[in-house]
């Protein structure tokens, strides 16, 4: 029988947040793949647990080379525990390659749910949480960063980003430029740690605040783009519905989607489609 790959969430700050199952998995795993073995040692000491299995490093620099070795252990029946420095593996951390390789071999993959900076920041931000998207780290180069932000300029879902403290001021300034200085946001710093701070306000104000220097682990949450009513004539509304229908959507769904995108009542789009259909019918 093949083994099991276990993705284990680790505390993002407060060690007391460690999931109860984490201790048992650390003690019983045949192999522990850790992003940083030194941090793993501090974690096990804090939890007063002694791993019985083999410990190997698994980080960005050796992820590609070490994945086959871990898959081989899994195929041989081992229980492999994957932990990163903080939070859930594969969320802007090593893990995706190993999960994909395990799935390809039909190996069971499970998880020990744990703390997440993404969800914690989102919940604390005070911004809408019903729909959101996680964008990870933005590019370091200014031009590439602006380009990526412009891709999200009209995104209506709440946006979540990770950022390094020494780049935060430039990133917030770029966000203010692309999204608008008045777009609401929250900078979540040192979550669950002693100096936890959530700074909320318009992007322009947050950029000025960050210019003075900010320390710690940073997660930025930005309000989605506001719904605006587009100035579209009936012909354009009908064209957009037709494009969606040709792509395979049912007419009812296409009308609803076009109305939502344009910020218009569905009835207005429906009437435009009906009028267009009647106009193209031959006279009796």
Image (spheres, helix red, strand yellow):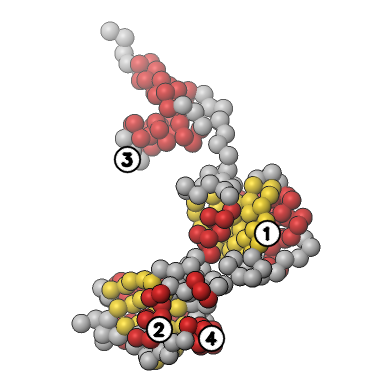
Q: Which mark is residue 171?
A: 1
Q: Which residue is mark 4?
A: 42
Q: Which mark is residue 248?
A: 3
Nearer mark to the viewer, of 2 and 3: 2
Mark positioned earlier in the residue sequence (4 or 2): 2
Mark positioned earlier in the residue sequence (4 or 3): 4
Could you tell me which quadrant the N terminus lies in? bottom left
Res. 103 visible in picture? yes
Distance CA(mark 1)–CA(mark 2)? 38 Å
Could you tell me which quadrant the C terminus lies in? top left
Decide which of 108, 178 is in the foreground and name it: 108
Decide which of 98, 251 is in the foreground and name it: 98
Nearer mark to the viewer, of 1 and 4: 4
Q: Which residue is mark 2?
A: 26
Residue 69 vs 133, above or below: the answer is: below
Mark positioned earlier in the residue sequence (2 or 3): 2
Judge from the rendering whether residue 28 lies leftward or rightward of residue 133; answer left or right.
left
Q: Alpha-carbon neighbours of circle 2 within 10 Å: few (<14), some, or many (≥20)?
A: many
Q: Which percent across, then down, holds residue 6?
A: 36, 76
Nearer mark to the viewer, of 1 and 3: 1
Mark positioned earlier in the residue sequence (1 or 4): 4
Distance CA(mark 1)–CA(mark 4)? 33 Å
């Amino acid at each position: 029988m093949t083994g099991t790959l276990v993705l284990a969430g680790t505390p993002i700050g407060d060690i007391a947040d460690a999931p109860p199952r984490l201790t048992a998995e650390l003690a019983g795993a045949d192999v522990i793949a850790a992003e940083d073995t030194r941090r793993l040692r501090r974690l096990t000491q804090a939890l007063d647990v002694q791993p019985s299995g083999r410990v190997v490093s698994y980080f960005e620099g050796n992820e590609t080379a070490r994945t086959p070795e871990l898959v081989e252990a899994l195929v041989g029946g081992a229980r492999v525990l994957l932990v990163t420095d903080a939070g859930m593996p594969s969320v802007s951390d090593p893990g995706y390659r190993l999960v994909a390789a395990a799935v390809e071999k039909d190996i069971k993959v499970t998880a020990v749910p744990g703390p997440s900076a993404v969800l914690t920041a989102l919940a604390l931000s005070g911004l809408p949480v019903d729909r959101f998207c996680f964008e990870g780290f933005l590019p370091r180069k200014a031009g590439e960063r602006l380009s990526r932000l412009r891709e999200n300029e009209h995104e209506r879902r709440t946006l979540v980003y990770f950022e390094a403290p020494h780049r935060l001021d430039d990133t917030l300034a770029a966000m203010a430029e692309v999204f608008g200085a008045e777009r609401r946001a929250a900078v979540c710093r040192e979550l669950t740690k002693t100096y936890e701070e959530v700074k909320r306000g318009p992007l322009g104000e947050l950029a000025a605040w960050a210019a003075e220097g900010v320390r710690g682990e940073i997660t930025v949450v930005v309000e989605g783009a506001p719904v605006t009513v587009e100035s579209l004539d009936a012909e354009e509304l009908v064209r957009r519905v037709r494009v969606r229908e040709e792509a395979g959507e049912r007419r009812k769904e296409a009308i609803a989607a076009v109305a939502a995108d344009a910020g218009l009542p569905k009835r207005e789009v429906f009437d435009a489609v009906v009028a267009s259909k009647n106009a193209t019918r031959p006279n009796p």
